Image (cartoon, rainbow, N blue to C red):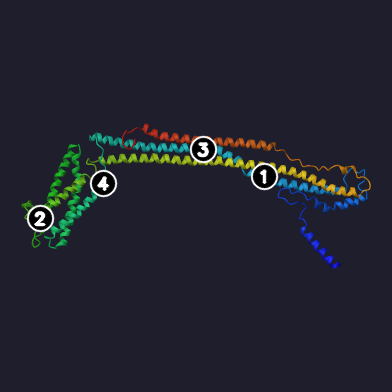
Amino acid sequence: MSSLGQKQSAIRRLLNLVNQPRHDYGPGTDIFLDLNVDLIAAELQLAQYGAERGAQERPAQDAQTLDDVEHRIVERIERHKQDAHSLYLEHLHTYDQRMAALDFEERFAVIRQAAPEAVGDFRAEAALGRDELFALRRRVIDSEREREYFRATHALVRQARLSTTGWMVLKIGILAVMFVIEIVVNGGFLAKSNPLGPLGGAVDAVSFAALNIIASFLCGLVMVRLLNRRNFLLKLLGLIGFAGYLVFAVGLNLVLSHLREIPPSASADTGQEVLKQLMHAPFVLNDVMSWVLFCIGFIFSLVAMSDGLLFTDPYPGYAGVEKRWFEANRKYREGKSELVDRLRIIRDGAIEAMNGAARDLSVRRGEFDGILKGRSRLAQRFAEHQNHIGRACNALLTVYREANRRARRNSVPKYFDKPYEIERIILAGDGTEETARERLRQSITESQQILEGQIKAIHEAFEAAAKTYREIDELIPGEKSGPASA
């Protein structure tokens, strides 16, 4: 039985060990944990010491100060108070570090310096754009003066007929089609008279077709167009060129027709025979198909010459002047559009950066207010914890004194009836914090006003730059019609 009692006692001791708290504090999630009065009283054996010392009538009735047991209680409480104060200072330091990390002063300095510089850089970019646009506009005016001088000199009132890419492709396509058709037609006709048969006829057909088409095209493009010039000598040269073209076209196609009529069995040289026929009877052809070949070749030659004549503006030199004018206007329009877009990109980037800086200040001001509130709550919790420490100290003293009182035969000392007042740690007031908060809010407001003012200045600078770009047309006026005015 005794052995069973010993086992139960050992089990009880194990249970007591497991259930024993690991520290002197009650469970909680606050920074400053409440003291566990019952645990401390049991640890210090206050009830036992109170009963023993009460039975010995200690402390004496006339005692004015705390005895050694009460001093141990107070020392225990004071140690906890100092630990709580150290914890308070650590958390306060953390708040101070968070506040320093906000780094408002550096941001204020950057805003005061960078925001006006952004406006200055924008205006400098606008000035460079004006210089570039001025040069482009001057080139437009110069090409416009050249165009107007050319028109006045040559008495032209119409617009130049410029060939588009599609129109040029169409004309070249026509030449190519005629070249192929003429090769096929000439090859069929010349195969009859060529000793080599179809192969020889094809070779002669390619040669004559190339000469007939290309030469006629170049005559129309270069020589015949001179007929449109106002200058008499140039017009006369164009007339001579047209006459020379007719002689060339008629002669070439007569050669082709006579070449067809020479039999392949002729012993003499074919070229000499053709020359003899041209010298003595150029317009005498014995076969109607030879005349058909002559007409086809001559018509193709006329079409090729007309193609060259209308390949660009009929008046020589007018198309080049008009193209230079159009090109200068195109570069001016594209340059103005590019410069405005470039300014718009710079403006939008600067405004986005300034708005971001303003938002950053607002966010950091919210963090600053949160830090100040956290500091205030920390100070309030520490003050409340000091109240708890005072109550816990008096509760521990009451445990000791009540046990002492019950064990006494005589009355207890008078100071037993008075609560013990612990020395409180006085915290600095938050008047300076409120002043700092107000000063910071004022600085943030001033910085945001600076940003708003600079954003407005950038908008105004953009409008002013766009206006000066438009004013370049008025400073350097040009034609009221055409791409420049458009």
* Numbered label attached to residue 465: none
**Residue 158 position (above or below residue 246):** above
Q: Earlier in the sequence, mark 2 or mark 4?
A: 4
Residues under labels 3 and 1: Cα distance? Answer: 35 Å
**Residue 281 position (above or below residue 108):** below
Q: Dot 2 surroundings within 10 Å: few (below 14), some, or many (20 or more)?
A: some
Please report contact status of discs 4 and 1: CB closer than 8 Å, yes or no: no
Residues under labels 4 and 1: Cα distance? Answer: 79 Å
Q: Which residue is mark 4?
A: 167
Judge left or right: residue 284 versus residue 126.
left
Q: Position of residue 282 (x, y in %)?
A: 7, 51
Q: Position of residue 217 (x, y in %)?
A: 20, 48
Q: Dot 3 surroundings within 10 Å: few (below 14), some, or many (20 or more)?
A: few
Q: Position of residue 156 (x, y in %)?
A: 23, 35
Disc 4 element: helix
Q: Which residue is mark 1?
A: 95
Residues under labels 4 and 3: Cα distance? Answer: 54 Å
Q: Earlier in the sequence, mark 2 or mark 3?
A: 3
Of badges 4 and 3, nearer the viewer stands: 4
Which residue sits at x=85%, y=68%?
3
Q: Which residue is mark 2?
A: 289
Disc 1 element: helix
Q: Amino acid at mark 1?
A: Tyr
Please report contact status of discs 2 and 1: CB closer than 8 Å, yes or no: no
Q: Which residue is mark 3?
A: 117
Q: Amino acid at mark 3?
A: Glu
Please report contact status of discs 2 and 4: CB closer than 8 Å, yes or no: no
Screen quadrant of the N terminus: bottom right
Judge left or right: residue 73 versus residue 195.
right
Disc 3 element: helix
Disc 2 element: helix
Q: Amino acid at mark 4?
A: Trp
